[in-house]
Amino acid sequence: MLVFLRPDADPAARERVLALLRGEGIRADHRTTGGQSFVETPPAGERLRDRLAALPGVDRVETGLAAVRLAEGRVAEGEPARTVEVGPVVFGDGSFPVIAGPCAVEGREVLLEIAAAVRQAGASLLRGGAFKPRTSPYSFQGLGEEGLKALREAGDRTGLPVVTEVMDTRDVPLVARYADMLQVGSRNMQNFPLLAEVGRQPKPVLLKRGMAATLGEFLAAAEYVLAGGNRGVVLCERGIRAFGDETRNTLDLAAVPALRLRTDLPVVVDPSHATGRAELVRPLARAAAAAGADGVMVEVHVRPEESLCDARQALLPEELERLAAECHAVRSALRTGVYTEA
Amino acid sequence: MLVFLRPDADPAARERVLALLRGEGIRADHRTTGGQSFVETPPAGERLRDRLAALPGVDRVETGLAAVRLAEGRVAEGEPARTVEVGPVVFGDGSFPVIAGPCAVEGREVLLEIAAAVRQAGASLLRGGAFKPRTSPYSFQGLGEEGLKALREAGDRTGLPVVTEVMDTRDVPLVARYADMLQVGSRNMQNFPLLAEVGRQPKPVLLKRGMAATLGEFLAAAEYVLAGGNRGVVLCERGIRAFGDETRNTLDLAAVPALRLRTDLPVVVDPSHATGRAELVRPLARAAAAAGADGVMVEVHVRPEESLCDARQALLPEELERLAAECHAVRSALRTGVYTEA
Amino acid sequence: MLVFLRPDADPAARERVLALLRGEGIRADHRTTGGQSFVETPPAGERLRDRLAALPGVDRVETGLAAVRLAEGRVAEGEPARTVEVGPVVFGDGSFPVIAGPCAVEGREVLLEIAAAVRQAGASLLRGGAFKPRTSPYSFQGLGEEGLKALREAGDRTGLPVVTEVMDTRDVPLVARYADMLQVGSRNMQNFPLLAEVGRQPKPVLLKRGMAATLGEFLAAAEYVLAGGNRGVVLCERGIRAFGDETRNTLDLAAVPALRLRTDLPVVVDPSHATGRAELVRPLARAAAAAGADGVMVEVHVRPEESLCDARQALLPEELERLAAECHAVRSALRTGVYTEA
Amino acid sequence: MLVFLRPDADPAARERVLALLRGEGIRADHRTTGGQSFVETPPAGERLRDRLAALPGVDRVETGLAAVRLAEGRVAEGEPARTVEVGPVVFGDGSFPVIAGPCAVEGREVLLEIAAAVRQAGASLLRGGAFKPRTSPYSFQGLGEEGLKALREAGDRTGLPVVTEVMDTRDVPLVARYADMLQVGSRNMQNFPLLAEVGRQPKPVLLKRGMAATLGEFLAAAEYVLAGGNRGVVLCERGIRAFGDETRNTLDLAAVPALRLRTDLPVVVDPSHATGRAELVRPLARAAAAAGADGVMVEVHVRPEESLCDARQALLPEELERLAAECHAVRSALRTGVYTEA
């Protein structure tokens, strides 16, 4: 629930709202986004809403989708754009970080080998799943904590921050201990307890769009994380489910400029899962760069044919190198235009 | 992973498989489904797979989607169809249970009122959400344990078993304490840790199809529950996401006979969420009955205009009464044909 | 363009509108639908619209989708529902005509054989394509006029009216000479010149929904036919394109009750093309009957394995007989409820 | 139907095939595509197929989708890529033609004004509809031949070739008389008589993908045109229908590299219809250039607010100028990589 203050409200107005909520034992935070000042608090009953709305200096009280504000708050003129930092890497500052690595952590040795190769090829972050969401219970489910340890070691050796998926609310502390960024996958985009849980810990979050999610639902999912106090959310377009039979999913690249108009959260694109075909990844990574994305995430393996999952979509390190070079060439060519307007 | 035994394998063959797995400290269960005999066990490395495949009497070892067998195992001739019992209610025996109740448990009083009304109108189970998956964090999220208590009381007073959603692995024991059947919602159809967790407790499970799930993925999700040892899964078709703008989702009624050809799990239909429009619920409930579904789930409220969620799709108790009568009329008219062949 | 007259307008008001339009050399017809009186005329420039709107007794002038009125005009209380007659067969009067026959007319002999069989099995109309829309130019394209002649002969011998597809504006007179009802197929639902052309001839029209058409677009397509003066349009839901891989298309059965609330045109269902699988046709035909459809259209062949197209979806005559019996059983069971309210 | 000759077949083998077909009074053409030599002919009965297959030097006879060959024939090594010429403009040679103009030709004056502006802004071809496919019969349907005349005049004055849509088989000669390139729109992608008709005249064809068409169906539609003898087909991806509510359609940009792997026909992208929102057109045009498209088609109007259709998606001429500059910048940056491999 958001309690909006009038533009001309004085600090005392804000204090009255906070005092009333704290008097009821309800958590409340004051924020300013896109030039608007408001107090954020959990949903409350109608009587409390009425009391809040009646306070001097209060403009209105909003709930539901209308209140999705932390994600939708666009940058006001003069304010700096929102950036999300993951160690030395910055999303949203005009750089174009490339997240790369295997689908799953399959073992310590091969991960170290891949990590060195992707760093060499131009990657800025290392990805790899230790907990894998697999359609069948009889598929490889990931190495769990052993995989997390391997990731941490690979990150430390290469200097690349690591991002990995968390699927269970109970695993959030464990994953947060090893990873630099927590990924919430497409299948969990509306796993609301999980979103709330990653929102209550401090590591930045990579939130992938659900296969059947509208942009409004995507932003509302981000709002769950943001409302928990975590301000480091990066959105990831990774393909939606449509009727096509040529690619695994349908990359909705229009989501990049469309999100740009609704949110100041950084947006990256995952052409590997969007297509499921290695030969389509590079052209679409370039397209993401041209459309104004803040980065890409791609699957890379040193020996794709040995990969335990998604072998058909993994690039070789040399393909990653070319991809990174082409994306940066596109960004350079467009430098003056992209960030100022669209 | 499933280790299939040859049709002519003797009991010693099975024992060799079980012994080898137990020797490795790996859980293993022997089952027979659709006339096939196999040992079910977690996925294992290639070396162990090869050792198993080499044992006398072993036909083959399967992993991944090819191994989805508990859900896909069709009834062999002469075997009774699978039924799922929830208290006195049976799904899959040719009866047509109607699950009805409010979208969310909004309070004890109104729930007791609705429960009495739906029982009077012909419902067999009571539904109602205590933990609500809501698109926005600023919408009503359910009453939690207080809601579960109200459900339990309403169930006990009316004699109706109660079904309610669980969203967080941590809440499974709590919800299982109060409810007679646990619902896994559409947004969590591929929340694999949750599926595994409800698979490890004994209460039957109502599994709703994901908005973008193929039938193969739906059955693989059921397999997660079944593989945990829980054999009481009822599938629920509730609409998929397509391009239509007339209804909230698109009811895929062909899923009912198509699932019938792939699984012996009971299948019910939820026309309330499929359409989001009360005026379309009754015709589609009748259609579900005619297509061979094993029951329906519908939202009912005594005062829909006061409902805290999904008000537009709730029926009045008198509409439910007519719906139930019409569905039973359809079933009676088709009695001889439906169960024997399609 | 529609010029709506005020409820209290006298006959002179209508005459003024007609006179003004005729004075400009523009075709104009007066109609009354759903209790509303209006003059229908082709779209005109803004100046003429303003002159019309300024006439005494004129309520408003509408263009575009807002003016889709002939299709959307619901029956006013006391008026009889719209029925469409094709020879002795009536759609929309509470009977449930079954349209059956082969995908394509493959030859005179086999068609006569099928026609006799479907009449025997309970069909009311004979279907069969003489002009076939085939995805590939290298597939069988139909027999053309030779096929039309065979259809006519089969219809005359069995007493079944015949319905067949027309794809080219130039063929409309030819097809109308032989057929009792003209079909416009899914791929041509927005072939506007074709819709206009069939709207200018008197034979009734079976209009199939496009694979990606909303209900509003479907009704607007019907409006093209109706606006040409042809009032005999029957709508056919035949599946939309969604992500599913189990059936050829996704039957949107909710379209039946949803159309019922927007139009008084009869609505039939084609479960053969919706699913592409013979074994799903009968359960879904029953479902269509239960949902309130005015009839079904199914593909039938005496030797499906010899069929030149869509062999997997053709029923045998004995399956048709059982389908018809089950549909009529469902309709009988629901007799009192369906037509009065939903 | 295609009769494939063996790689080692001598010219006499080809002559035997042609002689047999001509002896039966059947049209037959010999072609070579992607290094394969074959005779193209209309579908024939099984007996003739068997006779052809039995001829010495014949490899096999193919029908249906398997025979879609003219569109799917990829360039063999050493052969030049296929290019399509429209006056001085070339699609497929590495240039990046920009097709621009209004949705509809609304009048001679405004069209001349727009034509001059788009030429100034960098367009290579002028677009504009004289026959408009409109969802409602009560919307502006285009100026017909008067519009064609205005287009011709605007083309002649500016030196820009003109492309315009044809919707009715009967109008093909008329439109071909005025236009330099004929457009077949999305709604007619499977209007097979129209495809065949434009295939029988010599002007190049711009074929837009249907809203629910797979790439295989898209190529099969192109095959209808190519099989008529017209070799000048340019494919246009313009968005498919999915569940999104943010854009009018969903641009499937992966179609560009995926088509590249299946066909040597040039591929252009229409971001205006794909999104329906002017503010998304420029980023997606850049993305199309980066993904390897051969050009773009965009809607431009000098006063979008006065446009008779699709006003929300029209760019201003100055926006077109920037779009063209950015696309060319992207192409230059990628010059070495795009054409050689992806």
Image (tube, coloured by chain):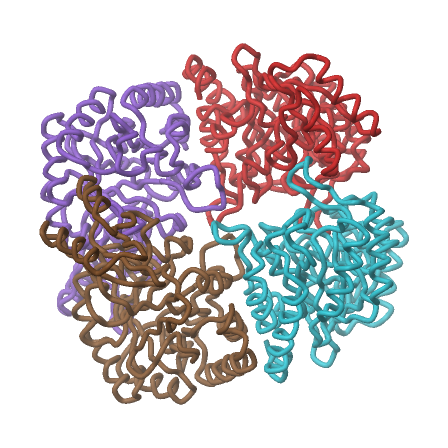
Chain colours: A brown, B purple, C red, D cyan
Please tell me which residue is depicted at 57% across the width and 15% down the height of the picture.
Answer: C81
- Does the rendering let one see residue A321? yes
Furthest residue in direction top, as rendered: C78
Observer-nearest of C183 and A298: A298
Q: Where's residue D210, x and y in %?
A: 63, 51
Q: Position of residue C272 (x, y in %)?
A: 55, 36
Residue A236 is left or right of residue C110, and the answer is: left
Q: Quadrant of residue C36?
A: top right
Tell me residue B148's x, y (percent).
13, 40
Residue C130 visible here: no
Q: Nearer the viewer, residue A193 or C330?
A: A193
C256 to the left or right of B255: right
Question: Within the image, what quadrant is residue A268 found in?
Answer: bottom left
Up/down of B58 relative to D94, above or below? above
Residue B191's spot in the image, x, y percent?
A: 27, 55
**What is the count of numbered marks?**
0
Answer with the quarter of the image where residue D113 lies: bottom right
Q: Is residue D184 left or right of residue B198?
A: right
Residue name at image x 71 percent, y 33 percent? C49
Q: Is residue B276 above or below residue C76?
A: below
The residue shown at (77%, 62%) is D115
